[in-house]
Image (cartoon, coloured by chain):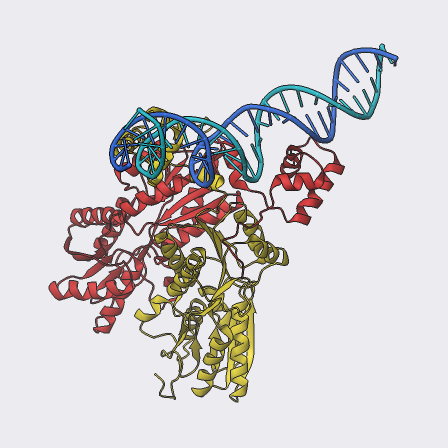
Chain colours: A yellow, B red, C blue, D cyan
Amino acid sequence: MHDFTNKNKKISLTQVASAAGVSKMTASRVLRGEGGYSEKTRKLVMEKVDQLGYLPNRLAAVFAGDKTSTFVGVSIPELGNEVFAQVLEGIDRKLGTFGHQTVLGLTQHTAEEEETWISTVLSWQPAGLILTGRLHSPRATEMLRNAGIPIVEIWDLNSSPIDMSVGINHFDAGFDMGRYLVQCGYRNLGYVGTSHDIANAATTRLAGFCKAVESGGGQVTKQLCLHDSATYYPGFYGTEQLLGSSTDIDVIFYQNDAMAFGGLQFCTGKGLNVPDDIGIAGWGDLPIASVLPKRMTSMHVPHLKLGQAAAEMMIARLSGEPVGDVRDIGFKLIPGSTVRNLTGLA
Amino acid sequence: MHDFTNKNKKISLTQVASAAGVSKMTASRVLRGEGGYSEKTRKLVMEKVDQLGYLPNRLAAVFAGDKTSTFVGVSIPELGNEVFAQVLEGIDRKLGTFGHQTVLGLTQHTAEEEETWISTVLSWQPAGLILTGRLHSPRATEMLRNAGIPIVEIWDLNSSPIDMSVGINHFDAGFDMGRYLVQCGYRNLGYVGTSHDIANAATTRLAGFCKAVESGGGQVTKQLCLHDSATYYPGFYGTEQLLGSSTDIDVIFYQNDAMAFGGLQFCTGKGLNVPDDIGIAGWGDLPIASVLPKRMTSMHVPHLKLGQAAAEMMIARLSGEPVGDVRDIGFKLIPGSTVRNLTGLA
DNA sequence: TCCAGTTGAGTTACCCGTAACGTTACGCTA
DNA sequence: TAGCGTAACGTTACGGGTAACTCAACTGGA
């Protein structure tokens, strides 16, 4: 095996230059193709580059130019949630086509993890930062403000972003879902979610949801916020808890589709008929939902597009183009078949 | 908004030092906490650091020390496939706890994209590379060999890796599935998958699968390799195609669970009884499978653990600890209920 | 009082590119 | 053949840190 403790004789531009019998500068010009050299020289240099296996040192280049790198730091709470994986995919693909690299940070939904990650990634002189969520620690906010680089806050639409923001209005999304369920005739509504720092988009949705339900004449009888991850099994046992304590709930709104599927499984396992005995509504519209026999009532958000939009704003800002500060990516209610549909909306 | 064209007056170590009335070196020593200064000096320097909002420039530090950075490049084919998202999560979490940063590269399953990504990321002097798949372009392989940094190839177990390898033996995994299905009494087997460059792990699985089926007395009547992504809908229409041309197939093995769910949906939609009329077997054991009414017959691979293991090997190698070259992470057959079970294995 | 030993802090030489000039060589015109 | 313009290439000065070395001040013991 290699011995990594030895400093591996990396080939530098100087070595290429001296091998080709030209100056460092000439070699540099050839490599960057900015002209100022003869075709003969170009060939000679490129030949040596191939021969020696020279790889440019971008680190030195950035350092020399006193510029920012082509890195873009991207913080994402978790990848277990398919939704965030899609956002990240959208971001990285778009950034990649513009010659930028994603430096990933999984912040586990906590502002502390985000803060330490931010200070680390800033020390690498990134070109910009894309952050999920709008809740940052005070020190993080200050660092971001002082960083002097473009910053896109995604996910939760932020009317007063640090710099830019893309996402949806979670209050409105929650409101629409609440209104829809009330329109479908439900009156005793339940909620099952989890409590996380950055998951406050979910909290905002819940607020909108409650508002709509109340103004529609229903009531949110019980809200359950588990201290667990927002995945299938917590959805399962959360439903068990909720229904165990309140028997008259006729529909449950979940933090996301994964939890809703867990809840659906619990209900059908108990012999409850969905949606006749109990309605189930999720959030996020997982891709798998479209090939399951029972279409989950949910809220569709174009996650891939969201990621792409964030990357586009970043790139536009970096290239000096005018960019709006806030971009609403929109959402769409999926009526599905896990709630009764009395409205003819489907 | 900020004006990013202006060079933002980044605070440098020199500025901190002069503000504190000490030399650059002393300030550097304080920042790195390597001793050689009085408590009074330390306080003074740190006070100025806070005051000026100084953020270290790791780029310059790496450059000065002629060392590698704390970056680890991680190439992943796509994130739409939940499985890879889990692998990435495992990698990044583990790397993060050891002070490393993930530089992501989505290679779209092609060796060309991987090659360009490799050369880009190598120019940032990463500490190491974690690559998905073992198929690299010749130039990529050469770059990797010459890079002189630890390299972990994951996913497909590689007996002669460039440096290190973690994953499973896909031939064996395919073989086990084939043997199981034959044991369950199936004789006319079909396969639905996609064709991609790096997805050759799937090809290897298929080879093992065919081997087992044939030596077990069955036959793989039809193999379908779609030119599409390995997701739900291709699973759906691939199944339609497969069953349209061959009516006597009694079980279908899919490239992954997502496609298998698509297939399951097609079959139940056509009124076919699964598993009595036709068996369905997937691969990967998606998390959602455990909360759906019908458990998908599949192969469980500990994806998160795979990612963690890759990161662990990387870190061990970086810190000079002895590391094995190849690590088998194992897999486990999930009998499920989408194939007939005549063997009592469940 | 002197000197060795210890500790704190300053100096200098890079690291690898790039930018901004400076220089050379050559061809063209007058 | 002087004069000039320009393409081609060389030189030099950074940039923000680190490592290794040097120097200065203070300590304590003989």
The residue closer to the viewer here, A209 or A291, is A209
Question: Residue A338 is drawn in which quadrant?
Answer: bottom left
Q: What percent of the width, then of the height, locates residue B37?
A: 71, 32
Q: Is residue A209 left or right of residue B176?
A: right
Q: What percent of the width, then of the height, locates residue B227?
A: 20, 57
Identify which residue is drawn at 22% across, 50% down.
B206
Q: Eyeballing the image, is B335 above or below B111?
A: below
Q: Is residue B147 visible?
A: no
Q: Eyeballing the image, is B45 above or below A168?
A: above
Number of dots carrying numbers: 0
Q: What percent of the width, then of the height, locates residue A296?
A: 38, 74
Question: Residue B115 is drawn in which quadrant?
Answer: top left
Question: Residue A207 is drawn in which quadrant?
Answer: bottom right
The residue closer to the viewer here, B226 or B240, is B226
Q: Quadrant of the C terminus of chain B?
A: bottom left
Q: Is residue B26 left or right of residue B151?
A: right
Q: Eyeballing the image, is B165 above or below B106?
A: above
Q: Eyeballing the image, is A154 above or below B34?
A: below
Identify which residue is drawn at 15% across, 50% down.
B217
The residue closer to the viewer here, A291 or B112, is B112
Q: Quadrant of the N terminus of chain B?
A: bottom right
Identify which residue is drawn at 49% across, 33% down.
B67
Q: Is residue A45 left or right of residue B124?
A: left
Q: Is residue B202 visible?
A: yes
Q: What percent of the width, then of the height, locates residue B122?
A: 39, 39
Identify which residue is drawn at 49% across, 77% down.
A172
The residue closer to the viewer here, B173 or A208, is A208
